[in-house]
Amino acid sequence: MKPNQLQAFVAVATQHSIRAAARSLDVSAPAVTKIVRELERELGAALVERSVKGITLTECGAALLPRAQLLLDDMRRARDEVAQLRDGNAGQVRVAVSAAFAQTLFIPTFRRLRQRRPGVSLHVSEAGLAGILTRLREPQVDFAVMHADPELLQDEFECQPLFPVRLVVGMRRQHPLRNRRSMHELLNAEWALPGDGGDPLSATTRLFASLGMPVPPRVVQGDSLTAALALVSQTDHLGLFVEPLADAVFKNLGIRRLELDDALPVLQVCVIQRKGSDLTPAARQFIACLREVLDETQLAP
């Protein structure tokens, strides 16, 4: 298998279209078709099926896709690492971050990385845990930085805990429930919560279960921090946020932190990567810069 064959196959598989794959690769559609057919002949198996609805993968194609993505990513990392070792100041870091990290520690980490390696390019994507794990698995990113419950991560991922973060309840300043002291008194309020509370393994479900409570019945769910903050600041929705984010943005948005007698669970801000994947020197430098920022802000244990 040649790199151009894998690239064409992955493009067709992810774009579900020969023409779209050709545009993404900047080649002609007949060229993409020829390359994919060469790969199929080499493997002795059909990989894609063509119909009026577009391209679908055969059983063999579906089995090859994740391996092809990993092979291409390993080749990219190898080229990147050689360039970084040769030039000392090149390469690319692809990191996925939670919105909370983006709003708090990302900028000081980025500034330090830019001072150390001004020639390194940085690609940042933002998502909730499910989206971040998908980006790692495909793989679209090298590693991720976000708060998570390490017990919820599958065996295919490695987690390096950085520091613990407390959860806090946020509400608008004049919320009618602002004098409540117990989570049980807030069960029937409207909430803005991350993820899918119907999933018995979700962080939200586990969080409320740890307090002896079901997930509240009236919930707006999703991975948009912007939407959650808007709902909490402008309506009677309550939200759960990590403490560093609350310290950074609550005041400017007119959100107050509810003081509770309940001890809310503690999450870990982690570096997450695919198990067995090696980070490039530039990626390791990003994490080193983050650890230095943590030491200076006294967030790390």
Image: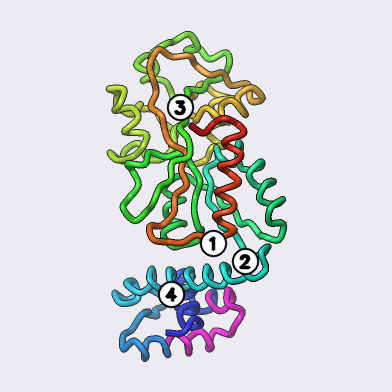
Question: Mark 3 against mark 4, which lies toward the viewer?
Answer: 3
Q: Which residue is mark 2?
A: 84
Q: Amino acid at mark 2?
A: Gln
Q: Nearer the viewer, residue 249 or 291?
A: 291
On residue 54, which mark appears?
4
Q: Quadrant of residue 70?
A: bottom left
Residue 45 placement, left or right of 177: left
Q: Please, what is the dominant secondary structure of the magenta stretch?
A: helix
Where does the magenta region start and end?
21-37
Mark earlier in primary sequence (4, 1): 4
Q: Nearer the viewer, residue 222 or 298?
A: 298
Q: Position of residue 145 (x, y in %)?
A: 51, 46
On residue 167, which mark appears?
3
Q: Which residue is mark 1?
A: 280
Disc 4 versus disc 1: distance between alpha carbons? 37 Å
Residue at figure coordinates x 29%, y 28% from the top left: 209
Sort mark 4 into few (<14), some (14-19) or many (20+) by Cα contacts within 10 Å.
Answer: few
On residue 41, which mark appears?
none
Mark earlier in primary sequence (2, 4): 4
In the picture, the quarter occupied by the N terminus is bottom left
Mark earlier in primary sequence (3, 4): 4
Q: Secondary structure at mark 3?
A: strand
Q: Amino acid at mark 4?
A: Gly
Q: Position of residue 202 (x, y in %)?
A: 34, 39
Q: Nearer the viewer, residue 59 or 112?
A: 112
Check contact, mark 1 vs mark 2: CB within 8 A: yes
Sort mark 2 into few (<14), some (14-19) or many (20+) by Cα contacts within 10 Å.
Answer: many
